Amino acid sequence: TRSTRPQRLLGAVQKNATRGDPCSVIQAIDHFCRNKEWAMNVGDEKGCILDAVVSEVNPATVLELGTYCGYSTVRIARLLPPDAKLITLEFNPDFAAIARQVIAWAGLEEKVQLVEGASGDWIPRMKEQFGVKTFDLVFLDHWKDRYLPDTKLMEECGILRKGSVLLADNVICPGTPDYLEFVRNSPRYESQYFKSHLEYTKVEDGLEKSVFLG
Ligand SMILES: CCCNc1ncnc2c1ncn2[C@@H]1O[C@H](/C=C/CNC(=O)c2cc(-c3ccc(F)cc3)cc(O)c2O)[C@H](C)[C@H]1O
Ligand SMILES: [Mg+2]
């Protein structure tokens, strides 16, 4: 049967990237998505903003919602200090399987814990399951209508601390209007918009960085 796009993306990584070299994995995926088949990775332009925020926060604990093929997982994990931990949630087993192989090709398995399951089920269990009390950085890139409910859940479960940074992809395209309205108007967040473009296109999109004030 015909392969899937994530399988072809993995093939491009295995063909064109060097094992253990995260930058070559990132470049191979960006080249594939720009020249062969578009895919919904955060991409190189928004990826540079993501890199800057990760470097600024220098997090010991990171939570990613929506692994997909693992592109942003590799972008984030490659910048983390040795004993830092990135937990990424992906509820589609086929995407999780692809992402595991992309992360392994980049040689970043030690820094990444890919959890197969839904954010709603796992956010409440972060403490007991992984011994993580709070997250220094959360990258939201899953279903756009889940950003707000999951943010409220993270608050309720106490996994955000004063200063935790939420970074949300696609706040313009496809758009997350309810989330944006919430973080921009809530007194408990200090929000900032980073204007950019939808991955591999000229369409406007951007990232919203929101600091939880406790
Ligand atoms: C209830 C479960 C919630 N909890 C969950 N828990 C765990 N994993 C979850 C949960 N909800 C979803 N996931 C996983 O995350 C991934 C989902 C990612 C979704 N991303 C987009 O939809 C998007 C679209 C465009 C776009 C823009 C323009 C276009 F024309 C077309 C497309 C661009 C972009 O950058 C985009 O990130 C993955 C596919 C899916 O299995
Ligand atoms: Mg996205």
Image (tube, rainbow, N blue to C red):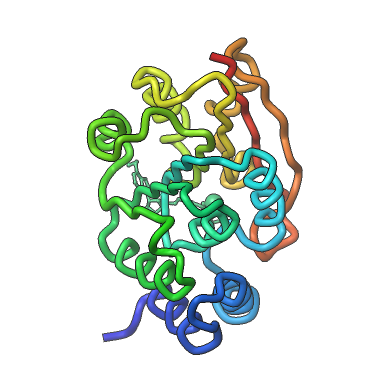
Q: Is residue 62 left or right of residue 153?
A: right
Instruction: Residue 39: give x, y in percent of width and height.
Output: 52, 66
- The mark tally for this picture is 0
Residue at position x 40%, y 71% in the image: 104
Q: Is residue 35 left or right of residue 179?
A: right
- Please identify the residue farthest to the front as the structure is shown: 83
- Please identify the residue farthest to the bottom as the structure is shown: 15
Residue at position x 49%, y 57% in the image: 73
Q: Residue 182 or 60: which is nearer the viewer?
A: 60
- Please identify the residue farthest to the top as the structure is shown: 187
Instruction: Residue 61: give x, y in percent of width and height.
Output: 47, 40
Instruction: Residue 206: give x, y in percent of width and height.
Output: 68, 44
Determine the image quadrant of residue 192: top right
Residue at position x 63%, y 74% in the image: 27
128 versus 190 height, above or below: below
Q: Is residue 59 left or right of residue 134?
A: right
Q: Is residue 62 left or right of residue 7?
A: right
150 versus 144 height, above or below: above
Instruction: Residue 75: give x, y in percent of width and height.
Output: 57, 59
Residue at position x 50%, y 76% in the image: 20
